[in-house]
Image (cartoon, rainbow, N blue to C red):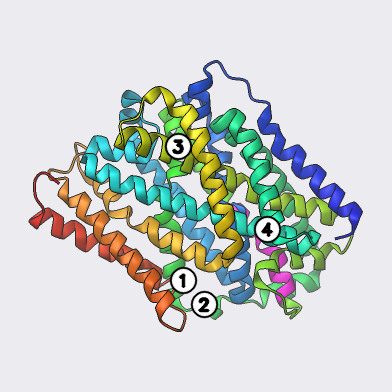
């Protein structure tokens, strides 16, 4: 981009992101960890939608759209269905969550299934959130390097430092506030961009030629299931339910988030479809920005577009850094290792810094967005049977905790088997279909644990 476009982009990005520095709260510790449990339906809706339309997902979605055309929209269909399934979670657990003052998903597992299940779920949530941090950092690095020309490692450090600046000051409250502003900016820009494309009859005709036939039925099923099932176990979205001021607010927020996600998927795919119709050869990771540039050229809007896309990265990055920090502080340091509960805020700040530094180092070494996304999705699926079983059990408890413990163990075995296979064997091992292997492994583990597990599991 030209220098003046860079100035516009960075200025808008700083304005959107640093709004998180200005958050007022009555109870700092509760606000830092869970927004004082007072989120309105609007806060929940926009924060949930911003979380799932983050930069890593956005660039991955665009890369698949560049490969498959309109068929890639099935990714967002799956994600939206997963958001809608959270209504079930609210109905089942919101009252219990408020009564027990829970703040994380592993805490719920501890209450329902015991310490060992909580321990395993803590490690899974930590690994899942850490993977998403790396995914967002890679997305930020790729975007900044490609559009501005700065060294990749410096781009990653810039994005991480910007997020930590307001996260360390206001925590979860800052996440929610920046999510709202960033998502609104993203949707407004891409809606106007899509409208400008569709007014052209030639553009409409070109896009409609991109049929759904380029994606195989098993790939469609894989994308929908991956999106749907990963959302229902997403620790960051559960936190929004925990922080809702009431069950009604949570339910209304989830329904609005469902609509926002479906709409976002439609408008966000337009630039990539445009560059695909032009037959331009481009790095799939840069297909989104390449498509935007093909529509608006080098006008001042290019800087606005870049800021909007990078804001989506930031909105997901801050969420995952916070989830990882809380997981290490509350679920592992305090719940599993017996640390003082009074140190939750201090511990969360410390671990947010540590996990961000480690993620920055790894993101410099490994920058394949598609592989990271599929690996994270596969890991998240190991939690699905435990969550689903809890939703079906009338009293919210499974008679033998071994059912959940072995489900999580077998799921982890399936996940590590997939990762090792992808490293050892040639060919495309990490695919949407293959990444589902964690789910049947977890189901088999649940069956084994139910019939053969020990009572003290």
Q: Which residue position is annotated with label 4?
A: 153
**Residue 230 seen anywhere in this rendered image of the structure:** yes
**Span colored in magenta:** 262-276
In the displayed structure, would residue 120 be above or below residue 365?
above
**Left or right: 68 with respect to 190?**
left
Q: What residue is pinned by disc 2?
A: 215
Asked if residue 270 is positioned above or below residue 167 in the image, the reply reads below
Q: Most extreme residue toward the top, as rendered?
A: 26
Q: Position of residue 441 (x, y in %)?
A: 26, 65
Distance from disc 4 to disc 2, alpha carbons, whole Å, reads 35 Å
Mark closer to the observer (3, 2): 3
Q: Are marks 3 and 4 in contact (CB under 8 Å)?
A: no
Q: CA–CA distance between discs 1 and 4?
A: 35 Å
Q: Which residue is mark 3?
A: 326
Q: How many marks?
A: 4
Name the secondary structure under disc 4.
helix
Residue 443 location, quadrant: bottom left
Q: Position of residue 106 (x, y in %)?
A: 33, 41
Tag 1 residue: 220
């Amino acid at each position: 981009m030209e220098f003046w476009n860079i100035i516009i982009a960075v200025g808008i990005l700083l304005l959107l992101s640093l709004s998180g520095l200005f958050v007022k709260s009555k109870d700092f510790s509760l606000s830092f960890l869970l927004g004082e449990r007072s989120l309105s339906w609007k806060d929940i809706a926009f924060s949930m939608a911003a979380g799932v339309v983050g930069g890593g997902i956005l660039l991955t979605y665009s890369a698949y759209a560049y490969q498959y055309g309109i068929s890639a929209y099935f990714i967002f269909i799956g994600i939206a269905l997963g958001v809608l399934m959270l209504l079930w979670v609210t109905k089942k657990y919101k009252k219990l969550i408020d009564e027990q003052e829970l703040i994380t998903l592993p805490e719920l597992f501890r209450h329902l299934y015991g310490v060992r299940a909580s321990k395993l779920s803590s490690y899974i949530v930590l690994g899942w959130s850490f993977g998403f941090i790396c995914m967002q950092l890679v997305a930020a690095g790729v975007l900044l390097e490609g559009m501005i020309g700065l060294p990749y490692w410096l781009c990653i450090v810039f994005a991480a430092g910007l997020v930590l600046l307001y996260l360390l000051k206001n925590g979860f409250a800052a996440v929610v506030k920046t999510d709202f502003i960033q998502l609104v900016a993203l949707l407004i820009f891409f809606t106007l961009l899509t409208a400008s494309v569709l007014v052209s009859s030639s553009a409409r005709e070109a896009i409609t030629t991109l049929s759904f036939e380029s994606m195989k039925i098993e790939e469609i099923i894989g994308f929908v299931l991956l999106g749907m099932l990963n959302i229902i176990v997403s620790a960051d979205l559960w936190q929004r339910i925990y922080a809702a001021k009431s069950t009604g607010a949570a339910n209304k927020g989830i329904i609005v988030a469902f609509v926002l996600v479906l709409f976002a998927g439609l408008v966000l795919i337009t630039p990539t479809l445009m560059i695909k119709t032009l037959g331009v050869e481009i790095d799939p990771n840069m297909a989104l920005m390449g498509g935007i540039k093909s529509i608006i050229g080098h006008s001042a809007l290019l800087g606005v577009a870049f800021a909007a896309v990078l804001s989506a990265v930031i909105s997901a990055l801050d969420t995952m850094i916070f989830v990882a920090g809380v997981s290490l502080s509350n679920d592992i340091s305090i719940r599993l290792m017996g640390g003082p509960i009074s140190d939750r805020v201090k511990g969360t700040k410390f671990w947010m810094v540590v996990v961000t530094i480690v993620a920055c180092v790894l993101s410099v070494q490994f920058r394949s967005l598609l592989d990271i996304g599929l690996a994270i999705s596969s890991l998240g699926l190991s939690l699905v049977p435990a969550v689903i079983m809890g939703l079906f059990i009338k009293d919210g408890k499974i008679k033998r905790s071994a059912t959940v413990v072995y489900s999580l163990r077998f799921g982890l075995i399936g996940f590590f088997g997939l990762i090792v296979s992808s490293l050892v064997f040639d060919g495309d091992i990490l695919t949407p279909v293959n990444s589902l292997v964690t789910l049947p492994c977890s189901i088999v583990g649940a069956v084994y644990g139910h019939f053969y597990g020990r009572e003290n599991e």
